[in-house]
Amino acid sequence: MSAFIHLYNMYEEELYSNCHNLAQFYLSNPEMFNVTPEILIVVYIINGNSLWEMKHYTESQKQYEEALLLRKALIDPVNINYTKDVKDQSIILGVIENFNESELKYRIAKCQVENQQAKEAYSILQSIPKPRPAKVNFMMCKVIQQCESGSDKNLITLYKEVLKKCPLAFECIDSLLNLGVKGNEVNSLIINTTSAEGSNFEWLHLYIKGLSDINNRKHAEAINTLLSIECLKSNPRILALIGEALYFSGDYESSYQYLKRSYDIYPFMKQGIQKYALLCDMFKKPKELELMLRPSSLFPYEYSSTNWFVFATYLFCSLKLDKAQYFINRVLSSHQYKNVDGLILNAKILHGNKKPNEALVSLRNALKYEPYRFEVHRWIIEILMATDKGKDAQNQAIKTLKLLGESPRTLTIAASTFLKNPISKEKAKIYLYRALELNEFYVKAVFFLAQILIDDKETKAAIVLLEKTSSVVSNIKISLMLADLYAKSKNLSSALEQYTKVLNLDSNNRHAMNGIMSLGTTSSNSLETTADEDFEAVENTPRNKSDETNEDELIWSDIEMEIN
C-alpha cells in the first residue's frame, strides 16, 4: 500500500487530526515518501479539508492556496500519470477533477468568510470565470451583504442565477422579494418546477404572494394568503411568517401565539425568533425566555447572533441592563448586515441605562434600514417624551403619521404627545376620535380618550365609552378604570363586578384588591353617613403607590403592556 493511500483512507474514515499529522510528514519531505508534485496537490487538498473540519480556517486556507499554486504550475494535471498503481491513480484523478481551480478558490473564500475577511473573499470569488456554480453565486450574495458593498441590482442578478439552477432555493426566493422584486417575476423563475406534474409545489405561488405582501406592507392580505396554505398549516416557517406579519400589523397577542407555536414545533427555528423574544419581554414572560436559553437546546459553540439576542432580551427583562448591553453589542458587531430588532433592543437598553441620546442614535440607524417599522417610531417618540422634549415628540409623531399613514396606533401615539399640555388636549381628542373611527375597540385610544373625558368632568361619557369596550375586549386597564368610575358614582355592584373581572385575569392585582376593600368600607359607612360623606370616603381611599403613577406616561411603556 502506497504512502498516499494511508492518508486517503484516514480521510475517508474522518480521522481529520490524524490526517493533518500524517500530511505534515509528507509535506516536510515529499521525496522521502515518493510524493510526486501531482500527488502533492492532493495531499494539500486533503490536509486543507481536514483543517477545515477542525475549524482551523487560516491553516486550511494556506493549504488550498498551495494546492492552487501547484496546480497552476502543472501543464495538464488531468493527463499526467500520477502513479503506477491503477487504483491510486483513479483516486488521485478523482480528487484533482473535483478540486479544479474554481473549487479551490471557492474553498479559499469560505475560509476568508469564516475569518471575517469578506472583501478578500468577494475578490477571489469574482476571479472565478463565468458561468459560475450556484454555490459561488450564493456565497457572493452573502459576502456582499456582510461587507455592505455592491448594489441591489447586482444582488438580484446573482440570486436569479442561483434560482436558474436551483429553483427551490428558498433563501434566494425570500431575498429577491426582500429586495423589492415583484412576486410575479419570482414566480416566473420557478414556474417549471411548480407546474410540473406530481411536484407537490402548487402551494409555492401562495407562499411567494404572502411574502411579497409582507414586504409591501400589505399585512392583512399576507396573513390571509399564508393561512390559505392548508397543506402546510403546521409548518414552523409558515407559522413564523404569519406571526411576523401580525407583529408588523400591531396585533402583538396573535403574533405571540403564532411565533410560540412555531418555536414549540421547531425550537431551532431562526425565522421570527427575535420578535418572539421581544414579545416574551413585552408580555413579561421571563420563564419562556429561560426555556429558549436552556442548555439542552444548543451547545455554546453553536450560538449565533440570534441566540445572543435572546440572551440580551432575557437580561433586559430581568433588569440586568449592563449584561444585556454586553450581549446586544455582541449581536450588533457580529451581525455585519442590518438587524433592526437588535437596534431597537439596544435603544431600549440604553434608555434604561439613562443614555437617551445614544438610544436615539440607535433608533435613527434602524430607520435607515426599515423606515416603515412602527416600533422604531414609537420608541423615538417615547424617549423624546421621557426627556421632556414634547415639541420634538409631536414633530416626530406628525412625521410618523405622514410616512406610515393613518391607523389606530399611529393616530393614538400622535395623540399621546399632546396629552400633557391642557391647551393641546383638544387636538389629542381629534386624533383619538379618528383612531376609534378606524377601530372602535382599539384599547389604547379608548384608554386615553376616557382619561381626557374624566379630566373634563365628563364621567358619564367616559363610563359609556369604557362599558362599550369592556363588553367586547377583556383588558385589565379598561376594567380598572371602569371599576373606579363605578365606585365614585356609587354603583357598587358594577364596581365589584369589574374588580372581580380584573382579579380573574390577574389574581395578584393590588389595585383591584384595594378597590374591593374600599367598596366594603363604603358599604358599611353608608349606613351611618350622608351620601356626600360616603362619596368622599371612596374618593379618598388610599391606593398603592404604583397605582398613583401617571398612567398617561406608562401606557406606551413595555412595563404596562397588559394594555395590549
Image: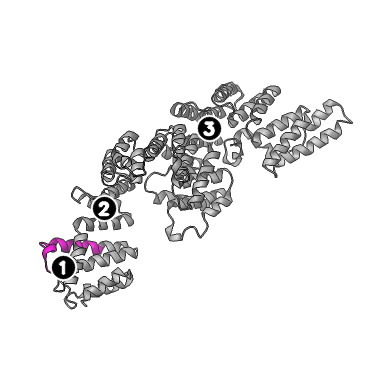
Q: Find disc 2 in the rendering and name its residue.
A: 120
Query: Sequence-wise, which precedes: disc 2 or disc 1?
Result: 1
- Could you give the CA–CA distance between mark 2 and mark 1, rounded to whole angstroms? 28 Å
Q: Is residue 317 left or right of residue 477?
A: left
Part of the protein shown in magenta: 62-81
Dot in front, 3 or 1: 1
What x and y, as percent, mark residue 79?
A: 11, 64
Vertical arrangement, residue 298 with respect to residue 522, above or below: below
Kindly give the residue lying farthest to the front in the view shown. 197
Q: Find disc 1 in the rendering and name its residue.
A: 38
Query: Sequence-wise, which precedes: disc 2 or disc 3?
Result: 2
Q: Is residue 70 magenta?
A: yes
Q: Find disc 3 in the rendering and name its residue.
A: 389
Q: Secondary structure at mark 3?
A: loop
Query: The N terminus lies in which quarter of the figure?
Result: bottom left
Tell me, yes or no, whether the two marked residues, 3 and 1, touch with CB atoms within 8 Å. Answer: no
Tell me which residue sits at (30%, 51%) in the image: 118
